[in-house]
Image: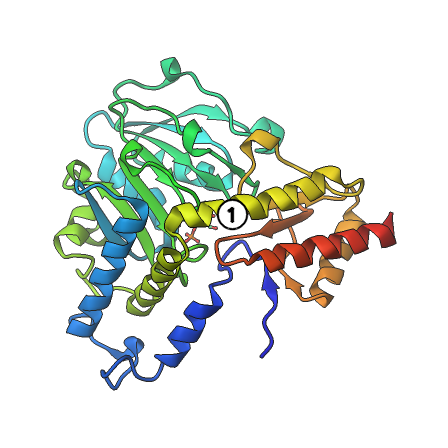
């Protein structure tokens, strides 16, 4: 069986154990005599899967009891609309930090429904850093404050200790590309959302953690399917949920738990990222594009300084069994996405290749 090292930013690699387990249960799940893909979402089999996924996620993320966990559809992009439609409730004002393309899209969508204000932006330096902010600049009566915690395209992150303190204003965090990778304090947020397709499972499910007092304030014209309260009241089964994706998430959550939980993931992720950043920093050919203090543990962009060499790097790395190392089209260069499921051996293989490539092309 051929397996490559897949450095894709998303959808990305899943733990081999999870894929094998799913394979073994593909045709018949337990004694059900049918695949999870074929079962009713109202069956006791699926309800057990859903409840297990929910309670594992609560345990892994240490989600307090006053928060609801929802399994939704429409990707993180639908959250860009759902957040303002549900959270603009008193003043119709919200603050945004623009730290990349996804953060900007969230801002633009919110601006359609209320008064969205940019508190800080790092666009002036191609989003290569996380701007420092002064809470004095925050809108004191805003309905929410939005950040993108890990910037997939540019490779920056808000470290857990740098999450802005927004006081009574609910903080909303897009954690699509760093969910379950590092310990964050959920109680600092009013709402966290993450598309599954990087660290949790297949595309098709988006997991939302929402503080219960933020439910029930959706604007009148909000489509029923975009009202968090509808999904909370119906335990994520208002309509047919993405059953198979939720099932794979449950297997991934079990894998995370068996490997030391989020703290265990964090320890390995820090080791993996450090190894790669150290190599880049000590090389003469490669250059990281992000200021060291804001570097992501999940997405590592780097360049050679020559478009031809970058293109050759991507081509040759593919031949060496590594996929998807091309940087995002808006940035160029290379990007190694090293999510939870990327083993240390993948980092070692990449570094070995980078050394060889440097020698041959210096
Ligand atoms: N937010 C972040 C941080 C992302 O990385 C992505 C996709 O890569 C999105 C949002 C959009 O997610 P989706 O494709 O699930 O709508």
| 167, above or below 88, in the image | above
Taking the spot 62% from the left edge, 35% from the top edge, the residue there is 290
Taking the spot 30% from the left edge, 65% from the top edge, the residue there is 242
Q: How many marks?
A: 1
Q: Where's residue 175, x and y in %?
A: 40, 44
Q: Is residue 15 left or right of residue 251?
A: right
Q: How is the image coloured?
A: rainbow
Q: Is residue 194 left or right of residue 237?
A: right
Quadrant of the image occupied by residue 257: bottom left
Residue 91: tell me if it is visible. Answer: yes
Q: Is residue 38 left or right of residue 159?
A: left
Q: Is residue 10 left or right of residue 252?
A: right
Residue 301: tell me if it is visible. Answer: no
What is the residue that sits farthest to the top in this orientation?
136
Q: Quadrant of the N terminus?
A: bottom right
Q: Where's residue 9, x and y in %?
A: 54, 53
Taking the spot 37% from the left edge, 38% from the top edge, the residue there is 184
Nearer to us in this view, 144 or 14? 14
Q: Where's residue 54, x and y in %?
A: 24, 56
Taking the spot 25% from the left edge, 28% from the top edge, the residue there is 143
Quadrant of the image occupied by residue 235: bottom left
In what element is the residue under mark 1? helix
The crowd level at tag 1 (other Cα within 10 Å; few <14, some 14-19, many 20+) is: many
Q: Where's residue 280, x and y in %?
A: 70, 42
* Mark 1 CB lies closer than 8 A to ligand 1: no
| 94, above or below 230, in the image | above
Nearer to us in this view, 177 or 333? 177
Nearer to us in this view, 40 or 105? 40
| 50, above or below 127, in the image | below
- The residue tagged 1 is 269
């Amino acid at each position: 069986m051929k397996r490559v090292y897949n450095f894709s930013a998303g959808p990305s690699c899943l733990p081999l154990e999870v894929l094998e387990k799913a394979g073994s249960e593909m045709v018949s799940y337990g004694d059900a005599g049918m695949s999870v893909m074929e079962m009713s979402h109202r069956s006791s089999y699926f309800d057990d899967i859903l409840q297990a996924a929910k309670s594992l996620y609560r345990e892994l993320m240490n989600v307090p009891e006053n928060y609801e966990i929802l399994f939704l559809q429409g990707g993180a992009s639908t959250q860009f609309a759902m957040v303002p439609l549900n959270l603009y409730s008193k003043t119709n004002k919200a603050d945004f930090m623009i730290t990349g393309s996804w953060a900007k899209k969230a801002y633009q969508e919110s601006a359609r429904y209320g008064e969205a204000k940019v508190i800080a932006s790092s666009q002036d330096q191609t989003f290569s850093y996380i701007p420092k902010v002064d809470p004095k600049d925050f809108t004191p009566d805003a309905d929410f404050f939005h950040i993108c915690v890990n910037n997939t395209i540019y490779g920056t992150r808000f470290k857990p200790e740098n999450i802005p303190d927004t006081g009574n204003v609910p903080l909303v965090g897009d954690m699509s590309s760093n969910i379950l990778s590092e310990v964050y304090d959920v109680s600092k947020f009013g709402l966290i959302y993450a598309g599954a397709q990087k660290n949790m499972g297949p595309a098709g499910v988006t997991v939302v953690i929402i503080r219960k007092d933020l439910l029930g304030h959706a604007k009148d014209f909000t489509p029923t399917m975009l009202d968090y309260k509808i999904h909370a009241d119906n335990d994520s089964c208002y309509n047919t949920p993405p059953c198979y994706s939720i099932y794979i998430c449950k297997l991934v959550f079990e894998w995370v738990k068996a490997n030391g939980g989020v703290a265990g993931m964090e320890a390995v992720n820090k080791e993996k990222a450090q190894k790669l950043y150290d190599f880049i920093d000590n090389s003469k050919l490669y250059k990281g594009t992000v200021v060291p203090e804001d570097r992501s543990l999940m997405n590592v962009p780097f360049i050679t300084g020559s478009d031809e060499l970058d293109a050759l790097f991507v081509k040759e790395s593919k031949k060496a069994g590594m996929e998807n190392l091309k940087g995002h089209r808006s940035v160029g260069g290379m990007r190694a996405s090293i999510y939870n499921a990327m083993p240390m051996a993948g980092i070692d293989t990449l570094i070995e290749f980078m050394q060889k490539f440097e020698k041959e092309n210096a």
